[in-house]
Amino acid sequence: MQAEVTPAPKPKVDQSSAISHKRAKGYNLHAGDKYYAFAFLGPSLLVLGTFVFYPMLRTLYLSLFLTNNVGRPTVFVGLKNYIGLLTSSAYQASLQATAVYVIGVVALTLILGLLLAQLAVKKLAGIQWFRTIFSATMGVSVSVAAIFWLFIFSPSIGLFDQIGNFLHLPIVAWLTQPGPAMFAVIISTVWMNLGFTFLILFGALQMVPQPLYEASAIEGASESYQFFHVTIPMISPTLFFTSTVTLIGAFKSFGLIDLMTAGGPNNATNLMVYRVYQDAFLSGNYGIASAESVILAVIIALFTLLQFKFLEKRVTY
Amino acid sequence: MKKQTVSHKVFAIVASILVVLAAILGWTAFSHPSASAQSNGRIKVVFWHEMTGPAQQQLIKFSKQFNQSQKKYEVVPEFEGSYNEAVQKIINTHGTDASPAVFQSMDISTSQMHHTGYTTPVQKFIDADNYDVNKISAGARAFYSNQGTQLSMPFNTSQPVLFYNATLLKKLGVTPPPVNPSYSDITKVAKQVMEKSNKKVQGMSVEIYGWLFEQFMANSGASFANNDDGHASTPTASNLTGPSTVNTMKWLQTNVKDGVFANYGAGGNALNNEIASFLSGRLAMFLQSSATTTQLTKGNKDQVGITYYPHPDGQKSNGVAIGGASLWISNDKSAAVQRGSWDFIKFLMTAKSQAEWQAATGYLALNKDSQKQPALLNMYKKLPESRVPGEQLAAAKPNNTNSGIFMQGLIQARNLTQTAMEQIYAGSNIQKALQTAQSSLNGNIKNNNRANGY
């Protein structure tokens, strides 16, 4: 902003010409730089090549085959694995379930995380306690979280069931009915995510310059007006970051699903990643599982791209 | 400038050498230490299993006993996670130093394990030793044999049975189900329980579990897949929509609709919840593996009744198949190691070992002579009902419909039958749910046969 306010024509021209001069050379490296580049990039290329690029290409290759009972590709089927998947109602249901899950998790995580951060940023007596508690789920492992929530959702002996019984509410079979089961895993995932999201957003809120609030208060802005017109714009880069991370994390959710519902009931929580696991490591159907992984990777890449394209534009400064 | 280039070159070369060195070091560090087949002069026999809890403890005990009983071999038991995961691990490590010499693999992986060509059928050793297999339960052997060849040795074996809370039924004044109950016998008891307990106790439950689905078919004498459930030749299609299967599902659905049936869903949690409800006196009857007997009776003040798996009305029970896992010998190990594996298997199958195995775990003793062993006699004295699963196993005459399904891809098949059960419990059209499962399964069978060149 300031650079625009104070225009200095002469040096600016010099600077840009210096840059274009360098560009014109097309990043022609010195002979010695080449060796440096090799020395520095070599190890990481080796590692990435072995553990990232090769597996990716191999997955792509496998997805075009049927695999036999020892996992070797035997019959080339072209895109038939993909076509078979995308036309099967079970896979479509899985896509739909994933969409519901991801939207639910991202929206709730951001809203609740922001709410907690907003509460914790207030300077009150004992607020340190709450800050610690709010970020506590960061230290909870997936298996512990699953056991904790299973205890709450379990039918006939679960906490919700006991409370429901006490209040004479109708009994909800949390993990054995499709709708409630999806709700249960979303809630558990959001709870898991909250600690991290809270911490990041809390940090961002503390970085918002106080004078902005003071100035807007003098102008007569209400607290909610301040929140939507000062706080949100100021922390928008952080919100963007957390939304991207949460989105990708939600697509990749596995542990809680495996431990809480194992994809059931009636495949209601059989998300895309869980299907990949089932097809590859339970059924040994590597061809289909590879096709599913490729579809998942494309979808995640697409969403990340969309976020960068549209959401980042709305990020103030 | 020139001098600097030289130093760049040197730097680059040194760096790449370092990387290569690190890679080699890492490689040697991670390559399996068991490459040294011999330790303290004994031949090492690595044994992969998937048992947890008391069963794992007992296996470790058996390995120690076997190692003490002779000086030639040393059995090293290694836990490998769940049944499903172990199958993939066994296949993926075959031919490397990391692979096991003898391993435990679950019932429904039998056809797959056989078709990998990675194993030596135990029949070879049975013939070489003139081992008397007639001592081992015929029903269990039939499950793991093909065209008269014993592929693997049945090991931890269970039967699906009906459990009921005998004390609770007595308190409510309900007559318990008979020894070999029909579907309507069960319904009658379930209805009475609901009525007499003022709906405080659920009448019955059947977990959404593909294994139980298969057992309903077995007990009514229906084939799951064509070509005699795969015992004659590789199946090319499944048959899930036959009248007896529809009839069974109708029985379950009617009971769900009538409110005498508790649905705990599918998966490990379902079993835990079912057991918890049973132990807290909220569930009167349920179908489950006999392997849960210990869990149900230990510390339970109520007396637990056990009886046979139910059969359709108006027909005799055909008998159910077993569940559990068997022991296989890998063929990527030397003859000496394979021999050691077989000797270990023989040790596990002795009357004494089998009796101790059942007493410790609830899995059935497969050696007929085990019935006279003190470990089992003690157990029967304490818990007379624990005889029932073994009696049910002995009563069934093995035939093609009650000796398991010799087909690959059964894990997927179970996912499909479980989905159908879930839909049926939720009130869906039975014929349609079964038809959907059948056509998906047939597609899988076709692909699988194509991929394997059958």
Image (cartoon, coloured by chain):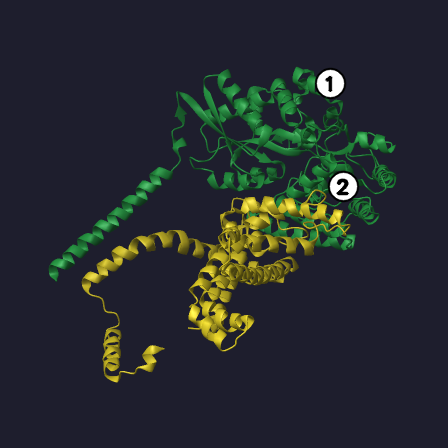
Q: Residue B371 at x, y = what percent?
A: 69, 18
Q: Residue at x 46, y 35 (%)?
A: B99
**Which residue does the numbered mark 1 point to in the structure image?**
B381
Query: Residue A283, can we see it?
Result: no
Query: Residue B68, can we see it?
Result: yes
Q: Residue at x 52, y 47 (%)?
A: A140
The front one of A218 and B115 is A218
Disc 1 and disc 2: Cα gap in Å? 29 Å
Residue type of the residue flagged with mark 1: Lys
Q: Residues within 10 Å of mark 2 (few under 14, many from 20)?
A: many
Which structural element holds mark 1?
helix
Q: Is residue A129 above or below residue A5?
A: above
* Lateral position of residue B187 relative to residue A99, left or right: right
Q: Which quarter of the figure has residue B269?
A: top right
Q: Which quarter of the figure has residue A81?
A: bottom right
Query: Which quarter shows the N terminus of chain B?
Result: bottom left
**Which residue does the numbered mark 2 point to in the structure image?**
B205
Q: Chain of mark 1?
A: B
**Quick one: which chain is yellow?**
A
Pointer 1 and pointer 2 on the same chain: yes
Q: Residue B71 at x, y = what percent?
A: 45, 17
